[in-house]
Image (cartoon, rainbow, N blue to C red):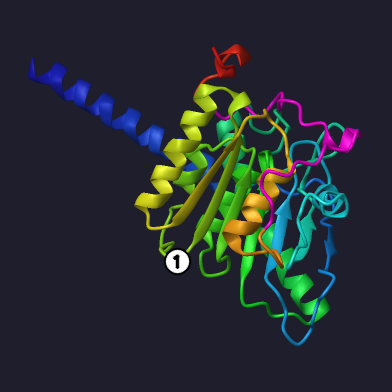
Amino acid sequence: MKTKVFYLYFLILVVVFLFQCGSKKTAEIKLEPEVPSKYVYRFPSEYDPNEPPPLVIALHGHNQAENQATKLWDEGFFYEPDFILVSVRGPFQGKDGYEWFSQNKTLISNPVQRGIASAPTCEEIVIKALAEFKEEKNIEPDLIYLLGFSQGATMALYIGLKNPDIFDGIAAISGNMDTFLLSASKIKDIEDMDIFLALGRGEGPRAVEAIKVTKSLLEQSGANVRLYLHDEGHVINASSCRAMQNFLSLSFEEAPETELIDKPESEEYDMEEEESFEYWEEEEDESDYQEE
């Protein structure tokens, strides 16, 4: 009997050891960039180089490009913006644009593990772009924020929470708020960080509940958080952008949150559900996210 118990105990130790080795191996995987890095930028109309305004680093959505945020700027989605906007290209290749999470399933089949392996690469790309822009324009702003749309919103949270010494705040608009990346970011020292979250109720009750959980988690960690809910679906609208400006004080005047601007009829603003961005614990039917 003792022999059986011993072998059972030994078997358990072997399984635990193999699991830990496998977990460590997964954690150490870091995917290489698939496309050249690039960023575009905009300056406010009343820019004074002697008093540089806040700097906002923008991360585009799924299958989009670095010009997504600058098009929003040009179309007036931001109200009299009193900040410098720098929009960065995601390091992975999408079908018609770029991604913040690799879509290459041959490298890592599990989407959660693929997302975790993508994150450090994106972090390096964004921080490098920030440093290059500051050196190129000889700018040293007092405040630096991260702004993410959709897929970029999740990555903005990950990068910002990992680097509170660099970023003073985060704005995540129309993104999936995934606990696995929030956990991976190892939240710390964010008591003075301002975080803006925006989501459309049209994304469904489970998505709304998830972002409320995220808000609670961030507040428990000491952040100053505002959750902005609107009645549309998975879109970027002017009300979200302007509510973000008000919260982070990024407009010359208080931006009118109720004034909506129609999205330009362009493929650049096609905010369809991300087909392969499945970062819930299990793949779920789209109907699960619709209002009953």
Choose top left, top right, bottom left or bottom right for residue 46. Answer: bottom right
Q: Residue 26 at what x, y percent from top left?
A: 53, 39
Magenta span main SS: loop
Q: Read off the magenta span.
A: 255-280
Residue 226 appears in the rendering: yes
Q: Looking at this view, is 241 or 213 the one in front?
A: 241
For this view, does 43 lie left or right of residue 231? right
Q: Is residue 154 magenta?
A: no
Choose top left, top right, bottom left or bottom right for residue 237. Answer: top right
Q: Looking at this view, is 197 or 167 the one in front?
A: 197
Quadrant into which the C terminus falls = top right
Which residue is drawn at the image coordinates 70% and 64% (left, top)?
251
User: Where does label 1 land, which residue?
Assistant: 192
Which residue is drawn at the image coordinates 75% and 80% (left, top)?
139
For this view, does 191 lie left or right of residue 143? left
Choose top left, top right, bottom left or bottom right for residue 149. Answer: top right
Q: In this view, does 286 lie above or below 84?
A: above
Which residue is drawn at the image coordinates 84% and 54% (left, top)?
70
Q: Is residue 142 above or below residue 7?
A: below
Which residue is drawn at the image coordinates 77% and 71% (left, top)?
132
For this view, does 12 lie left or right of residue 199? left
Q: Residue 38 at what x, y percent from top left?
A: 84, 57
Quadrant into which the N terminus falls = top left
Q: Residue 113 at what x, y percent from top left?
A: 56, 35
Amino acid at pointer 1: Asp
**Circle 1 SS class:** loop
Residue that sits furthest to the bottom in the current view:
50
Q: Does the magenta stretch include residue 260?
A: yes
